[in-house]
Image (cartoon, grey):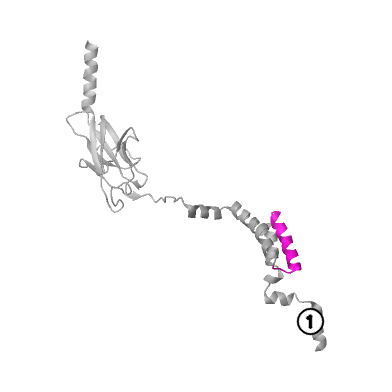
Amino acid sequence: MLISTTAVLAVSLGLAAAANIKGNIRANDLLADLSPRGLSSSTRVVLDGGRWSARVARGGEWELQGVPEGEWVLDVLSPQYDFDQYLVRVPSDPASPPTLHPHTPFSPLSSTAHTLPSPLSLSPRASRAWVQREDGFGTQIKGMLANPMMLLMGATVIGVVLVPMLLKNMDPDAAGEAAKRRDMIARGDIGGGLKGIMDAPGNRGPAEVARAAPAGRAKGKNRRK
C-alpha cells in the first residue's frame, strides 16, 4: 500500500511539474501571410531536436504540451524559412511559470539570458531560396534537349531518314557524296558525316570556290595575256 501511494505521489508531482509552452508565428517582410502557400503545413515547433513537437495552426498558433522540468532548446523546422532558436526553462516549482530566452546555436545554455514575454512570437529571419520544379511537357522537352544521347539519336535520325529525301533534288555526284556521309552518320561517325556535308560544294563560299578552280584555266588566262 505504501509503494502504491509513493508511486501515485511521484506521478502527480511529475505531472504537476510539466508545463505547456504556447506561442504563435507572425508574418513579416519574408512571410507575407500564414496561408498554406505562405507557410508550409509541414512546419513544426520542436523542443530538444524533436522530442516534443507541435503543429502550427492556420492562424499561426502552436502549443507544446507536457514539457518537464529542465532547460530545452526550442526551434522551428520549416522547409521555407529559417527561425531563431530559443531557450525554454521549466522550473521545478509547479507554481513558477516557464521562462523563455534567446539562444545562439552551439552556445552554452546561459542562466542570465534576457527573458522574453510569453506567449512567444516567432517570425522567420531568412528565406530558403528553393525553386519548385514544374513538371510539364515543356520541362520534358528541355530535359530531352539537354541529354547528349537524345542529341545523338536526333542527329542519327536526320542522317538516315531526312537525308534521302534531300537526295532526290541533287545531281548524281552530289547525291553519291551525300549517301557516303549518310552511311558515316549511320555508323556513328557523326562528326565526319556532318563535316563532309558542310564541306560540300554547295555549301562553299565564293572565295573557297575560286581557290578550288582548276589550275589549267588560270594558265590559259595567262597565255592570253
Placement of the C terminus among the 4 image quadrants: bottom right
How many neighbours does mark 1 have within 10 angstroms: few (below 14), some (14-19), or many (20 or more)?
A: few
Q: What is the secondary structure assignment of the residue under circle 1?
A: helix
Quadrant of residue 155 in the image?
Answer: bottom right
Q: Is residue 211 left or right of residue 57?
A: right
Res 115 seen here:
no
Q: Nearer the viewer, residue 82 or 149?
A: 149
- 116 is higher (above) or lower (below) than 29: above
In the current view of this chain or complex, which residue is farthest to the bottom?
Answer: 225
Residue nearest the observer in this picture, 162 or 39: 162
Name the residue: 79% across, 81% down. Answer: 218
Q: Going 21% across and 23% down the picture, which residue do you hit?
A: 13
In the image, is residue 171 part of the stretch drawn in magenta? yes
Q: Give 211 or 175, whichever is nearer the viewer.
A: 175
Most common SS among magenta residues: helix
Q: Position of residue 20 (x, y in %)?
A: 23, 33
Q: Which residue is mark 1?
A: 218
Residue 141 visible in the displayed image: yes
Q: What residue is rendered at 19% in x and 34% in y?
A: 97
Residue extending furthest left?
95
* Residue farthest top in this picture: 1
Bounds of the magenta span? Answer: 169-188
Which three-letter amino acid code belongs to the residue tagged 1? Ala
Q: Tell whether 96 sits left or right of 213.
A: left
* Picture quarter with the N terminus: top left
Task: Give percent across and percent down for residue 64.
Answer: 26, 35
Q: Is residue 194 above or below residue 135?
A: below
Which residue is nearer to you in this view: 57 or 25?
Answer: 57
Residue 189 point in image, percent of width and height: 70, 56
Residue at image x 82%, y 84%? Answer: 220
Residue 44 in the image: state x and y as whole percent.
32, 39
